[in-house]
Amino acid sequence: MPNAEFIELTNNTASSINLLDWVYGDASTSATLTNFILNPNEYVILCKNSDTSLFQPYGNTLGLNSWPSLNNSGDQLGLRDPLNVIVDSVEYTGSWYNDGPKSDGGWSLERINPTAPCSDANNWSASVNNSGGTPGTANSIFNNQPDNSLPEVVSFSVIGLNEIQLELSKSLDSTQIACLLY
C-alpha cells in the first residue's frame, strides 16, 4: 500500500452521484471535488494531487489540490454536498484503532458498517489487511449488518423547564432519533 494519506468514499445509494462541488475537509483545510460520477456500490479514493498515481492501481482516484492532514492522534473530518449539507462526518481519535502499534501510523482506520454515517468509535477499527488498508475495495473489517440495539442513557441533566440533555451510549442519526421519539 502506498505510504501516503487517503480517504475512501463509497456510494451506498441506488443512484449515481456526481461529486462536482462536494467539499471534503477538516477544521483548517478543505477541498472542493471535481466532476466525478460515483456509481452505486462503487468506491473512489481521495488523496493529494501529487499522490494520485500511487493510488490509481487500486481503483477510482481523485487527487485534491488542498489536502487536510490526517492526524494519527485524531481529527474531525467532514463531507458536504453542493448545498452545504453534511453528508458524513467523523471525529476520530487514535484510540479508535483498538490496536496500540497500528495507531502509530501505517495502518488505515476503517469503518465497519458503511451504512452508518457519522458514526462513533464503535463503528471503526484498524484494518486487519496485511498491507495496512484496502483502498478502493470493501474494508477488511466490513460488516453491513444493521445495529438494532437501542442506546442506553449514560447520563442526563436538566437544562430548563421543558428541556433535558441526554448522553447516550452510541450516536444516532436524525432518522433514528425521530423513530425513538415517535
Image (cartoon, grey):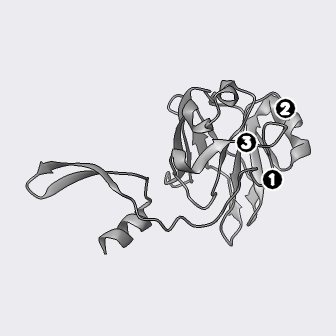
What residue is at 71 percent from the left and 32 percent from the top? 65
- Looking at this view, name the residue that lies furthest to the bottom: 182
Which of the two discs, 2 and 3, labels the residue nearer the N terminus? 2
Foreground: disc 2 or disc 3: 3
Which of the two discs, 1 and 3, labels the residue nearer the N terminus? 3
Q: What's under tag 2, amino acid-wise?
A: Pro
Circle 1 residues within 10 Å: few <14, some 14–19, many ≥20: some
Q: What's under tag 3, amino acid-wise?
A: Ser
Q: Residue 173 location, x and y as percent? A: 44, 59
Circle 2 residues within 10 Å: few <14, some 14–19, many ≥20: some
Which of the two discs, 2 and 1, labels the residue nearer the N terminus? 2
Residue 104 higher or lower than 127, as above or below: above
Residue for badge 3: 127
What residue is at 55 percent from the left and 30 percent from the top? 74
Residue for badge 1: 137
Q: Secondary structure at mark 1?
A: loop
